[in-house]
Amino acid sequence: MVRATVQCVNYGSMKPGSDEPVFTVSELNREARELLEGSFPAIWVEGEISNFIHHGSGHMYFDLKDPQAQVRCAMFRSANRRLKFQPENGLQVLLHGKVTVYEPRGSYQVVAEHLEPAGEGLLRRRLEELRARLQAEGLFAADRKRPLPELPQRIGVITSPTGAAVRDIVKVLRRRFPAVPVVIYPSQVQGDRARHDLVAALETAARRAECDVLIVGRGGGSLEDLWAFNEESVVRAMAACPIPVVSAVGHETDVTLADFVADLRAPTPSAAAETVVPDTREWLSRAQSLGRRAGRVLRDQVRLEQRHMTQLQARLRRVDPRLVMRQHAQRVDELGLRMRRGLENRLAVERARLARLNVALQAATPLYRIRGSRQRLATGRLRLAAALRARIGSSREQLASLGGALHAVSPLATLERGYALIEDETSGRLVRDAGDLEPGQTIKGRLARGSFLAEVKKTSKR
């Protein structure tokens, strides 16, 4: 029961000889409106529509009555444009609105913000109670939502096999990505049997585990038509399903508990099909773009490897075996020259020493000195001979070692592979350039075994 106290502040005048205020009609109606609006929150009223008028301005005016009373109601255009049914006389409805007073006439009325058939209103109250309970359990929490696969290998559809929704879904899937197979899990989507079919289909899909994503839905309808998707057993089955679920129930304005528990809500079945698979053309475009990028990367890599190969070729030319052989040949010549000079110097020293001994011997006339000198001379000769033999033996060993090293890089080894050394017959100089030869000139060719003389017929720079 609502109790109210009227406070009058500066209204009208006071009755002569009394403390009672005197209201004007406007003041009284305004005070009554403020009293009602401040005392009553938004309320629900159930009753039968009568005296219904849909004004040309878009506003609706009607009475809401029961067997004992009636109340005037108004529903303005901004609110009634959201109605999903057409109000008419004799229709039992559930109204949600605020109590107020229409001041120009002094009549109180209810301004409706929402209007629905009375039976649907009961369903909505049940729906709201179940929604609040399931939400408190955390079934609608955002952290439970799982991402959909970018490209599913197989898509499951739980709906009526004869409805328009399944045709729309399959048509969109075939248009966007026809390579992905579709599995239909048939189920009633309306009526008493629908909730049992939907739960069984969800459990079957989970048990078979053959799909990467499930679309659960149907076409549009009234709250009663869509009620199977508000059933607690269906909502819990969707929450327990290990496969990501897309809810596609009704039209964009239809909302069911399946939408809250699903991993993704689609406004329509066709939109759900658009969501679960990519567009083939977009994927082809991405593949072509990746192919072009891969081509550019490969071309850049080939150019890099070509530069590397060019650098290696330049390094290989710098270590050409022919250049190495020439350097070794020059080194052998230098060592041979040093060896000959060393032997010649040693022999010269020994010859000088022998000459000095001969002079000293000739200068000593006494016979014993001659004998002693002869004996020392003989000993010196023996030592000299031994020293020379040792020196010559050592030199021969060194010469053999150098000869072996020289042979390893010797032109003779090259001659064994089928090459020839060409010399000028007159000077004995090796010929390295065809430009040094003249037609008719005699040349000597040395092979691995033997040599030959030849006459130059013609020369060429190439």
Image (spheres, helix red, strand yellow):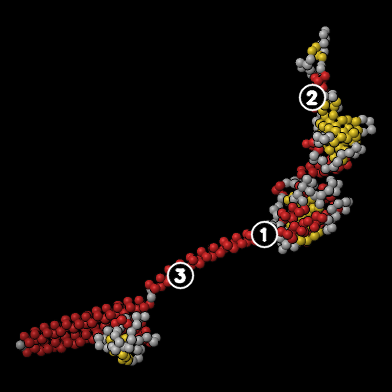
For residue 456, which quarter of the picture? bottom left
At 37% across and 86% down in the image, what residue appears?
419
Residue 229 drawn at (x, y percent): 82, 49
Residue 309 bears which disc, if any?
3
Q: Quadrant of the N terminus?
A: top right
Residue 293 % position (x, y):
57, 61
At which x and y percent is residue 253? 78, 45
Circle 1 residue: 281
Which element type, helix, strand or loop, lies under badge 3?
helix
Front position among marks 1 and 2 = 1
Q: Residues within 10 Å of mark 1 (few under 14, many from 20)?
A: few
Residue extending farthest front:
56
The image shows a total of numbered marks equal to 3
From the viewer's perspective, tell me whether residue 422 is left or right of residue 2.
left
Pick the residue in front: 136 or 130: 130
Dot 3 crowding, Cα within 10 Å, few <14, some 14–19, many 20+: few
Q: Which residue is mark 2?
A: 34
The image shows residue 144, relative to residue 387, as above or below, that is: above
Asked where in the image residue 211 lies, by quadrant, the reply is bottom right
Tell me how far mark 1 sits from mark 2, CA to CA. Answer: 63 Å
